[in-house]
Image: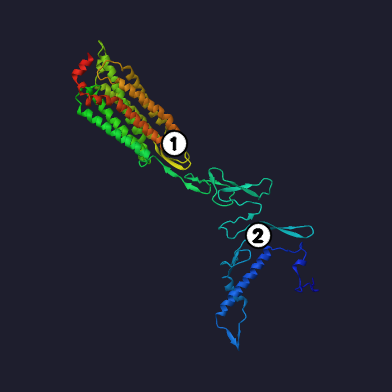
Amino acid sequence: MPVMDDDTCTGEERLESLPAGLFEMHMSGHSYSIYNSVYALAHALHAMDFARSKHKSKVVGNSVELQSPQPWQLHQFLQGISFNNSAGETMSFSDQWEMNGGFDIMNLITFPNNSFQRIKIGSVDTYAPKGNVVPISLCNAYCDLGHQKKRKEGEKFCCYDCAPCPEGKISNQTDMEDCFKCPEDQYPSKNRKQCIPKIIQFLSYEEPLGKGLASAAASFSFITTLVFATFLKHKDTPIVKANNRELSYILLVSLLLCFLSSLLFLGQPGKVTCLLRQPAFSIIFSVAVSCVLAKTIIVYVAFMAKQPGSRVKKWVGGKISYSIAVSGSLLQMCFCTVWLSTFPPFPDSDMNSVNEEIIVLCNEGSVTMFYCVLGYMGLLAISSFIVAYLARKLPDSFNEAKFITFSMVAFCSVWLSFVPTYLSTRGKGMVAVEIFSILASSAVLLGCIFFPKCYIIVLRPELNSREQIIRRQH
C-alpha cells in the first residue's frame, strides 16, 4: 500500500489490505450514514438538474452551456427527496431537516491489543408511536399485546421473555412491564388485549322471565278481583257471612295488593322503588297473615263460646278480630319505620359477582332489619298455623280452619325455601326468586281460603242456604 512521506493517501489504497482489528471492515452505523448521505446528494443533484433543464439555458455558439450549481441551491431539493436504499428503507428529510430512519445500539468492546469489536445490542425505531421509544434488545423477545415482560433466569437484568397476562389483567401496549386490571365497569377480553364495557343487567319487563312474572302477577290480580266481586255480589249469603265477612274483604284487598307489589321488583331499580319494595310487600303481607290469624282465632273462640258456662262469650264479635288484624300489622309497620329511618334501602350496583355484567340492584341497607321483617312475618304465619291446626276438627259450618292449616303449611314452605335460594343467587335470579315467592304464597292463600267458597257460591248454590246449614249442624 503506497503511502506518501507526509502520511497522505495516494488514492491506490484498498480496504482489503487494512488490518481488520484496527479498522472497521463491515457495514457500520457510520458507513451506513455516509452511504445514505451520498445517495441523498445524488438524488438532490438529479432533481436540481431536471428542474434546471426546464428553464432557458444559456446558448454559446452551437452548444448549450449549463451554469455550475452552487451548494446552497441543493437545500430546497434535499428536503423534498424520498428514495428507497438497497436495505429497503425509505430515506427522506423531515421538517426539522432530520433524516428518518432507525438506529442501531452498538456496544464497542476494546481488547488489550487495542483492537475492538462492535456488537449490536439493540435498535431504535423512529417510526414507532410517539412517546418514549424503548430500544429493542437482541436478547429479548417482542412482547405483543396481551403479554408482559418476564425476566430470564440466569441472564442479564435487561433480558426478558414474554408471558401471557394473568387472568383478570390486560396489556394494551407492546413490551409492557406489567399487565394491569381493567376498571370496575369493564372486563378483560379473551385475548387480554383490551377492556370491554360491562353490560348493565336487571330484571326488566321486556325479557321473557320478566314478561312471565308480570303476566302471572296481572293474572292473579284479575282472579282476586273476580273473587272479591263474587263475594260482594253474594254478601248476604251464609257462606260469605261465616267467619267475619269484613275480614274476608280486607284479606282479599291485601292479597290483591300483594300480587301488585311484586311488580315493584321489575325494571331498573330507582330510589323510590327501592324504598317501597321490601317495606310495602312486608306490610301488606303482614295485613294478610294477620287477617288469616284473626279468622282462625274467631273460629276457635266461637266454638268455645258455645260451651256451657263459658266466659269467652264476651270476646265473640268483630272487635277482637279487628284488634288482632290491626295490632299484627302495626307492629310490622313499626319495624319498617325504624328500617326506613335508620338504614333505608337504596339503588346500588354489583360489579364483581359476574365478570361481564354490572348488576343493578336495591341494597337492603340493613340486612338485620330485612330479616327481622321476614322473621316477624314468619312468626305470624306459624301462629296462624298452630291455631288453625287446633281448630281444624271443630264442628262448625263452613269451618275454614282446615283450609287455613293447609294454606299456612304451604305458605311457610315457600318462605323457608326462599331464604337459602335468595342467598345463593345473584342479579336477576335473586329478584325472580323473591317475586315467585310473593306470587306463590299469595296464590296459596287465595286458593285455599276462597276457592272452596267460590265453588259453593257459583257451582253449588243449594249448599249456600240457611236450611242446609241447620241440616249440617244436626
Mark yes or no: residue 457 visible.
yes
Q: Position of residue 332 (x, y in %)?
A: 34, 28
Which residue matches tag 2? 104
- The crowd level at tag 2 (other Cα within 10 Å; few <14, some 14-19, many 20+) is some
**From the image, which quarter does the C terminus lie in?**
top left
Q: Image point 29% across, 22% down: which residue?
A: 294
Extreme-front residue of the structure = 459
Q: Is residue 77 above or below residue 199?
A: below
Relative depth, front residue between 154 and 54: 54
Q: Position of residue 144 (x, y in %)?
A: 57, 51
Q: Is residue 249 above or below residue 4?
A: above
The kind of residue on which mark 1 rests is Arg
Q: Earlier in the sequence, mark 1 or mark 2?
A: 2
Q: Is residue 381 left or right of residue 395?
A: right
Query: Tag 1's secondary structure?
Result: loop
Q: Image point 45% across, 32% down: which residue?
A: 424
Mark yes or no: residue 329 visible.
no
Please tell me the numbered disc located at residue 426: 1
Query: Tag 2's secondary structure?
Result: strand
Q: Is residue 1 left or right of residue 474?
A: right
CA–CA distance in space, label 1 to label 2: 57 Å
Q: Is residue 236 above or below residue 63?
A: above
Q: Position of residue 106 (x, y in %)?
A: 68, 58
